[in-house]
């Protein structure tokens, strides 16, 4: 099976090493910002956010004189991440200790937990762990001033939103406006483009951000060497396609489709039985653990956990067993529906196989995070998405096309998240020393300044911009199927996203951000930057200075390989940048993995739902339409088999209509 993405990592060990206070790289980065009242930690799964919060909370209690630390998690099972932890033996000044009565992530009624929360707030106890729900319910019973000089920590912060109906979002807004509470927000996935903003822009601006990228995390592992993201398209039943993507020798989590999705048979228990039949013969179910023993077709004995079964007597036994896994041989395959995603820790997991597309980038990040734990003996992690291929005869072909394109788009963004991040540095701040890998210099010495806001966006928020762009389904569909010119995206859709996310930017700053985002994408599509000192001896080099390829001319410069030539990144033509199709890789996947007839069906389904040409797009396309007429000696045709020519024809019709309306007004 072909992977859309295959990334090799350096195994540097940096993300796993500890400093003299017992902190990993990410934890130390967060601790450096411990004096901030509002702190937002954006870091991937498995990098130690829970312990980072312990360090921060204890410092606020001991050194910043706060009264209490309240840790909230989305569900009870994740509360175990904040159990008593010995920190002194690793160099920290005190341990993390939670009194048993202050751990509210246990079984019991909401009423009882609210009472426990109220008791804690009235006592001299200092640390409490509860669920988001318990915090919300308790908050309604207490005056907001009760949280003065307290730290409220929200784990899995992406559960919050600025939507008026989101009670946790409203709670945070109230705390910030009406109390002296400190807030630490932590998430492994922070993408405003998924749905509505997590925070209002004015609230987010108050947070100090600590960002630790997925690439930093994975590159700093000791054992994991590579990660792959792959697709498999099937027709008929997904069960029949399982054998092509499932290797029973790999430690695997299988997520079956939601019962409301097109891939589901609507019988979740029947699907589990069918998967078990594909794996082999069920020998027994252990009465104590609920674990299934299956004799594989290759003769191995597999231990399989069924988390789809919601039987009140069986599921708790299976969950208890999984929480206590100590060795790789303890379990082989987990079959789940909505579980085994967020906060679920199985370090030995090598493969996550997800059936059906997932609309949320956050969910994809969490699922991939199950396989990207560092573990001795695990060199490769794999995410596979098994997606229904549209049937040209199906009345619902448009829905299938939408699902397929959304799934591929999501993983294109994952490609940016999991690969080295392009960083931008102003020339005025460069000391002339060798640049760090994947660094682009912005020339701000010739009268053009670069604000700190622009740098912050380019170096921290590029993926959020792309996530928001990808939330525009019409743009995504037309770009992936290449039924619209890339300039319609780069010069119309992308600036609209930037303006919406950052309305306070000047026009010059918006253009700097736009070009920086596109530069990053172009660099990623061409395989990354090459330092001048690393150019091949026989390289065909374009430095833009006329003195091509001399050693003095390439020193300290970064180059991009375009075809057979290495072009200095400083001299990238704006027309080249504007011609970047952010979704070109997705079109390549489609063209390689579906036949020509199916590709035509997909393009036709997109064209049938095409949006109207906008005035901005018509202005952009007008020079191309004129060039087309000169080259072909005719107007572009609406009946052409070339989707780009059809788009030109639609834009030309729009322009003529606008001209007629203008002339009619003048005549009147």
Image (cartoon, rainbow, N blue to C red):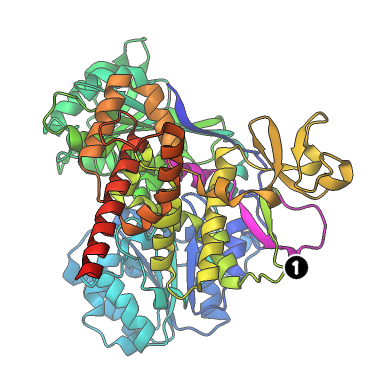
On the question of residue 291 being in view, the answer is no
Q: Nearer the viewer, residue 639 or 238?
A: 639
Name which quarter of the figure residue 249 lies in: top left
Which residues fall within the magenta stretch?
412-436
Q: Nearer the viewer, residue 448 or 70?
A: 448
Q: Nearer the viewer, residue 39 or 429?
A: 429
Q: What residue did someone put label 1 on? A: 428
Helix, strand, or loop for circle 1?
A: helix
- Number of marks: 1
**x 52%, y 85%: residue:** 65
Quadrant holding the N terminus: top left
Residue at the farthest front position: 667
Residue at the farthest top position: 298
On the question of residue 335 being in view, the answer is yes
Q: Judge whether residue 417 is colored magenta.
A: yes
Q: Nearer the viewer, residue 218 or 193?
A: 193
Quadrant holding the C terminus: bottom left
Q: Is residue 530 above or below residue 444?
A: above
Q: Picture coordinates of residue 132 (x, y %)? A: 29, 66
Q: Judge whether residue 586 is colored magenta.
A: no
**x 63%, y 69%: residue:** 450
Q: Is residue 209 left or right of residue 634?
A: right
Q: Picture coordinates of residue 258 (x, y %)? A: 20, 40
Q: Picture coordinates of residue 413 (x, y %)? A: 44, 45
């Amino acid at each position: 099976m072909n992977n859309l993405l295959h990334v090799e990592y350096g195994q540097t060990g940096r993300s796993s090493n500890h400093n003299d206070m017992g902190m990993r790289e990410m934890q130390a980065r967060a601790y450096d910002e411990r004096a901030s009242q509002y702190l937002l930690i954006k870091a991937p799964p498995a990098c130690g956010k829970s312990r980072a919060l312990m360090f921060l909370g204890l410092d606020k209690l001991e050194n910043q004189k706060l009264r209490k630390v309240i840790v909230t998690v989305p569900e009870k099972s994740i509360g175990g991440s904040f159990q008593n932890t010995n920190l002194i033996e690793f160099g920290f000044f005190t341990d993390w200790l939670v009194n048993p009565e202050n751990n509210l992530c246990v079984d019991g009624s909401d009423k009882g937990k609210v009472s426990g929360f109220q008791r804690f707030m009235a006592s001299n106890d200092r640390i409490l762990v509860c669920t988001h729900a318990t915090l919300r319910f308790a908050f309604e019973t207490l005056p907001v001033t009760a949280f003065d000089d307290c730290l409220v920590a929200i784990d899995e912060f992406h559960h919050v939103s600025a939507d008026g109906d989101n009670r946790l979002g409203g709670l945070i807004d109230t705390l910030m406006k009406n109390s002296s509470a400190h807030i630490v927000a932590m998430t492994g996935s922070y993408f405003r483009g998924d749905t509505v903003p997590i925070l209002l822009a004015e609230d987010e601006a108050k947070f100090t951000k600590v960002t630790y990228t997925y690439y930093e995390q994975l590159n700093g592992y000791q054992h994991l060497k590579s990660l792959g993201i792959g697709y498999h398209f099937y027709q008929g039943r997904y069960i029949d396609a399982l054998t092509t993507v499932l290797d029973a020798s790999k430690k695997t989590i299988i997520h079956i489709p939601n019962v409301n999705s097109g891939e589901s048979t609507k019988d979740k228990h029947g699907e589990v039985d069918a998967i078990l039949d594909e794996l082999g013969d069920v020998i027994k179910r252990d009465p104590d653990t609920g674990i299934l023993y299956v004799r594989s077709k290759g003769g191995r004995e597999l231990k399989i956990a069924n988390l789809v079964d919601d039987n009140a007597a069986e599921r708790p036994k299976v969950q208890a067993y999984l929480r206590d896994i100590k060795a790789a041989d303890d379990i082989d395959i987990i079959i789940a529906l909505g579980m085994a995603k967020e906060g679920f820790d199985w370090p030995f997991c090598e493969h996550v196989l997800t059936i059906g597309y997932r609309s949320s980038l956050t969910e994809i990040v969490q699922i991939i995070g199950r396989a990207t734990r560092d573990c001795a003996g695990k060199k490769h992690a794999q995410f596979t998405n098994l997606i229904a291929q549209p049937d040209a005869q199906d009345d619902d072909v448009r829905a299938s096309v939408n699902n397929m394109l959304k799934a591929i788009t999501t993983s294109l963004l994952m490609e940016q998240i999991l690969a080295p991040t392009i960083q931008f540095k102003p020339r005025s701040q460069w000391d002339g020393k060798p640049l760090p890998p994947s660094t682009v210099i912005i020339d701000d010495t010739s009268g053009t300044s670069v604000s700190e806001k622009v740098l912050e966006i380019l170096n921290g928020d590029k993926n959020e911009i792309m996530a928001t762009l990808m939330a525009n389904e019409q743009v995504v569909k037309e770009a992936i199927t290449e039924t619209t010119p890339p300039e319609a995206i780069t010069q119309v859709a992308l600036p609209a996203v930037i303006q919406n996310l950052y309305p306070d930017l000047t026009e010059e700053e918006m253009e700097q951000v736009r070009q920086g985002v596109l530069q990053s994408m172009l660099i990623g599509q061409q395989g990354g930057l090459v330092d001048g000192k690393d150019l091949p001896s026989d390289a065909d080099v374009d430095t833009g200075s006329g003195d091509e390829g001399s050693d003095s001319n390439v020193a300290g410069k970064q180059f991009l390989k375009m075809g057979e030539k290495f072009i200095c990144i400083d001299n990238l033509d704006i027309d080249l940048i504007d011609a970047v199709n952010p979704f070109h890789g997705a079109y390549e996947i489609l063209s390689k993995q579906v036949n020509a007839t199916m590709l035509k069906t997909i393009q036709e389904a997109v064209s049938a739902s095409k949006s109207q040409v906008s005035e901005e797009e018509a202005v952009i396309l007008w020079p191309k339409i004129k060039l087309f007429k000169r080259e072909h000696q005719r107007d572009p045709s609406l009946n052409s088999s070339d989707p780009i020519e059809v788009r030109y024809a639609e834009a030309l019709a729009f322009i003529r209509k606008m001209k007629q309306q203008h002339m009619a007004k003048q005549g009147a």
